[in-house]
Image: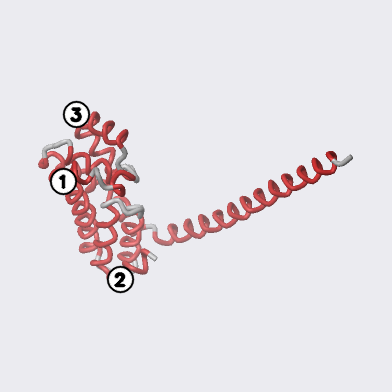
Amino acid sequence: MIQGLVEHFTYLGIFAVLFVAALGVPIPEEVPILAAGVLASQELVRWWIALPVCLLGVLSGDVVLYWAGHHWGERLLNWRVVRIVLTNERENALKRAYRRHAIKTVVTARHVMGLRAAAFLTAGIARVPFGKFLAVDAVAATIGVPIGFGLAYFFTDQLEDLLTDVHRAERWFALFVLLAIATALGIVVWLRNRQGVSDEP
């Protein structure tokens, strides 16, 4: 679905998916980056445009989160949807981390899916200096994004084979889970029937 969106809207699609992923929508950031690398390897997009667009999409979402936290942090925390991502415990832990090691916290959050949105929102709430936040985040993104893009660009065939193997493994795993559930239900029914028979006079 994501690759279809990126193919249809090309550069705008790449930017849009990465932007909403950075805002906390449950889309792994790596997926549109890999899709962009694959499209570039197939010459459907120009790599020297697609790669900067990836970086721009990632950083734009991060900056929006920071400024939202900086300007409307306390009001945003009253929203239930925000509290799903940023619980009280996580907020306090991140604030402590920013007070001790702001740079390390930004770098770590940039590469941890599920923590990124909460951490960058908290960076604004904790009043981490914007210049420091942007510089560290940009350096981390400039390292991480080209690596994912480059792997997809240079190893597209291997990536497709890997995804085929993953899908095959997922099907076998799903079958195993269904068989396990069916077996467990069968055992429960058998035990109940047996107990009912033993209770009869």
- Front position among marks 1 and 3: 1
Residue at point 35% right, 55% down?
Answer: 27
- Up-down relation of residue 5 to residue 189 (above or below): below
Whether residue 98 sits left or right of residue 189 in the image: it is left
- Up-down relation of residue 151 to residue 1 (above or below): above
Q: Earlier in the sequence, mark 3 or mark 2?
A: 2
Q: Which residue is mark 2?
A: 44
- Up-down relation of residue 117 to residue 126 (above or below): below
Depth check: give the residue in front, 59 or 148: 59
Q: Which residue is mark 1?
A: 72
Q: Earlier in the sequence, mark 1 or mark 3?
A: 1
- Front position among marks 3 and 2: 3
Separation of marks 1 and 3 at Cα, in angstroms: 20 Å
Name the secondary structure under disc 2. Answer: loop
Separation of marks 2 and 1 at Cα, in angstroms: 41 Å
Mark 2: amino acid: Leu
Query: Which image quadrant for residue 60?
Result: bottom left
What quarter of the picture does the N terminus occupy?
A: bottom left
Q: Position of residue 33 (x, y in %)?
A: 31, 57
List the single residue furthest toward the right.
Answer: 201
Residue at point 25% right, 39% down?
Answer: 107
Query: Which image quadrant for residue 129?
Result: top left
Q: Which residue is mark 3?
A: 99
Q: Position of residue 98 (x, y in %)?
A: 21, 32
Name the secondary structure under disc 3. Answer: helix
Disc 2, disc 1: CB below 8 Å?
no
Separation of marks 3 and 2 at Cα, in angstroms: 45 Å
Depth check: give the residue in front, 109 or 195: 195
